[in-house]
Image: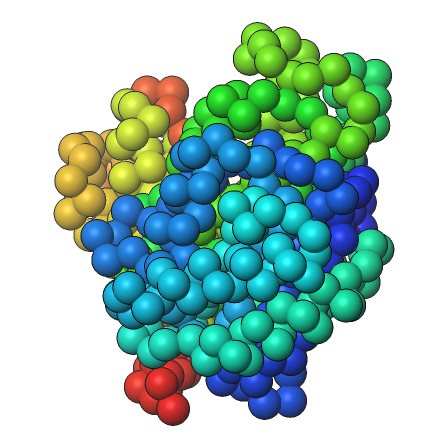
Amino acid sequence: MKKIEGGVTAAQGFEAASAAAHIKYEGRTDMALVFSKVPCVCAGTFTTNVVKAAPVIWDRDMVYSGKPAHAVIVNSGIANACTGVQGMDYCRQTAEEAAACLDIDADSVLVGSTGVIGFQLPIDRIKAGVRKLAENKRPGIEAGTEAAKAIMTTDTVHKETAYEFEAGGKKAVIGGMAKGSGMIHPNMCTMLGYVTTDAAIEKALLQKALGEIVQETFNMISVDGDTSTNDTLLVLANGLAGNAVIADENSADYAAFYEALRTVCRELAMKMAGDGEGCTRLIETRVIHADSLENARIFAKSVITSSLTKAAVFGRDANWGRILCALGYSGASFDPENCDLYFGEGEDQILIFTNGSAADYSEEKATELLSGEKVVITADMHMGDADATAWGCDLTYDYVKINADYRS
């Protein structure tokens, strides 16, 4: 497996486009298309929030129906959430417009929306945007990058990645794009994410892989503790790599596919955590030697969701008491007299807490380790062999500024 350039258009047979539909933003694109030359096997995971946006319901029903997918239409600016029957009808109209422009079936069109909750989509602008997307679609890395930029809301950077691997003696590619900066606290995955691959794989096995991988990638990030109404992660596989269909979860081909998909999802998840609204630093919390994987994940997420820990990182304050406190209220049990806390990684790692009290460490060195773009916190629980990693970001003044007037 090796990293390559690109995102959703890195795999064979995928095209993309962006368009300015003037849904909310001016002076930028706000609609994106991902299109496959042939129908795709499709898998997806969706928000567990009881309040689900219309496009989540549309996509969930389509994925679970087993129908092939041919295209995805995404808009930013308005979420099409809490919009009732009209919101669902706008999903249908969007799909029908795309079907007419792209000469495909309407029930092969997935839709996605992100932005302000409670507003109806300007459907005439959406339809006009769909027509522009159909006219502009093309293969190539640049087209995929432009699509990734079009789905941004408060994101400061676009998010894409791609990897090449081998399956059945054939070169295959998995690439993806995602958006997410605020309202990030996955209970599935809190964001929009679209992953494409030219590998051939059975639908049931693709869904199985995605369901497992999301638990250790997108479900291990948090920015602000809010689970969105629009969470959607879709994977489209068109089979154009020419490999024999991956149908055995015990095969080497499945293992290679799984690792590539996990790497793509992990990178996109980390990019989102590191671009949290107003943030200045990515926080990576590693929990090692926990008694179970479940508890390792609970410990790690408790630390990266702690507002006090996030604020301390912003202030470059080595306040390890907040980290220990977050572990203590996580809901999982451990012995605080037999837990070690570290800042940093590799040769720069320093011990800050051990044997129930502060270690003999340099405050200056700790401040230095809290000043980089990535802050690593490690908690050694000394209980077993389970490890887990979670990602978050610091909490800054700008987070409040951004969200105090988000609608305007």
- Report if residue 295 is visible in the image: yes
Does residue 149 appear to the left or right of 314 in the view shown? right
Q: Position of residue 318 (x, y in %)?
A: 37, 63
The quarter of the picture where the N terminus appears is: top right
Does residue 284 appear to the left or right of 264 in the view shown? left
Residue drawn at the location 38% of the way across and 20% of the way down: 385
Residue drawn at the location 57% of the way across and 72% of the way down: 127
Residue drawn at the location 35% of the way across and 66% of the way down: 87
Q: Quadrant of residue 223?
A: bottom left
Q: Nearer the viewer, residue 287 or 37?
A: 37
Residue drawn at the location 48% of the way across and 64% of the way down: 93
- In the image, residue 257 sits, relative to residue 249, either above or below, namely below
Q: Nearer the viewer, residue 200 or 257?
A: 200
Q: Nearer the viewer, residue 171 or 35?
A: 35
Count of numbered circles on the image: 0
Q: Position of residue 73 (x, y in %)?
A: 58, 60
- In the image, residue 271 sits, relative to residue 234, either above or below, namely below
Q: Position of residue 152 (x, y in %)?
A: 56, 70
Does residue 142 appear to the left or right of 48 in the view shown? right
The quarter of the picture where the C terminus appears is: bottom left
